[in-house]
Image: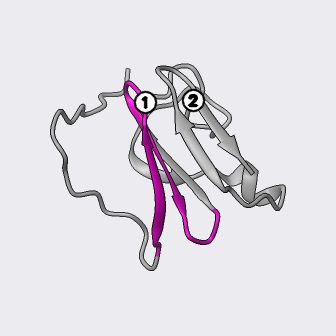
């Protein structure tokens, strides 16, 4: 079982270089950001697939949701629910 650090207080996060974040949303145990370029990055607890990476793996590192890039979709908005993530493209 993967250990996921839960931060009760704001903490600095290292994102890949040259990314400018335009929107942030937090769920119960996961977080998502939309970049100014329209890409979605997610991290945290992924047991229900809410990170959007096609699996149920959790991650402490922000990872780009590759499926959206492969489909040529530009993310406009993200809203995280308790165990879900909604994306408007």
Which residue appears at 43% of the width and 30% of the height? 27
Horizontal side of residue 80 vs 12, given as left or right: right
Q: Residues within 10 Å of mark 1 (few under 14, many from 20)?
A: some
* Principal secondary structure, stretch drawn in magenta: strand
Front residue (pair 45, 75): 75
22 relative to 42, above or below:
below
Up-down: is 23 above or below 4?
Answer: below
Asked if 24 appears above or below 4 in the picture, the reply is: below
Hey, which residue is sitting farthest left in the picture? 9
Q: Which mark is residue 27?
A: 1
At horizontal 68% and vertical 53% (from top left) the residue drawn is 66
Specify whether 72 is left or right of 6: right
Where is the N terminus found, in terms of image quarters?
top left
Q: Position of residue 17 (x, y in %)?
A: 42, 76
Mark 2, residue position: 50
Closer to viewer: mark 2 or mark 1: 1
Front residue (pair 36, 48): 36
Give the magenta-colored segment's residue range.
19-38
As helix, strand or loop, the secondary structure at mark 2 comes to loop
- Residue 72's spot in the image, x, y percent? 82, 62
Q: Is residue 28 magenta?
A: yes
Tell me the number on the disc at residue 62: none
The answer to which image quadrant residue 6 occupies is top left
Q: Are marks 2 and 1 in contact (CB under 8 Å)?
A: yes
Tally of numbered tags: 2
Residue at image location 28% in from the left, 57% down from the top: 13
Residue at (63% x, 35% y) in the render: 86
Q: Is residue 4 above or below residue 10?
A: above
Q: Quadrant of residue 59?
A: top left
């Amino acid at each position: 079982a993967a250990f996921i650090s839960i931060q009760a207080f704001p903490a600095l996060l290292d994102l890949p270089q040259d990314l400018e974040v335009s929107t942030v949303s937090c769920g119960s145990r996961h977080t998502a950001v939309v970049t100014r370029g329209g890409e979605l990055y997610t991290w945290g607890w992924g047991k229900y697939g809410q990170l959007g990476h096609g699996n149920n793996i959790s991650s402490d590192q922000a990872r780009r949701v590759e499926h959206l890039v492969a489909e040529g979709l530009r993310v406009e908005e993200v809203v995280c629910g308790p165990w879900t993530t909604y994306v408007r493209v």
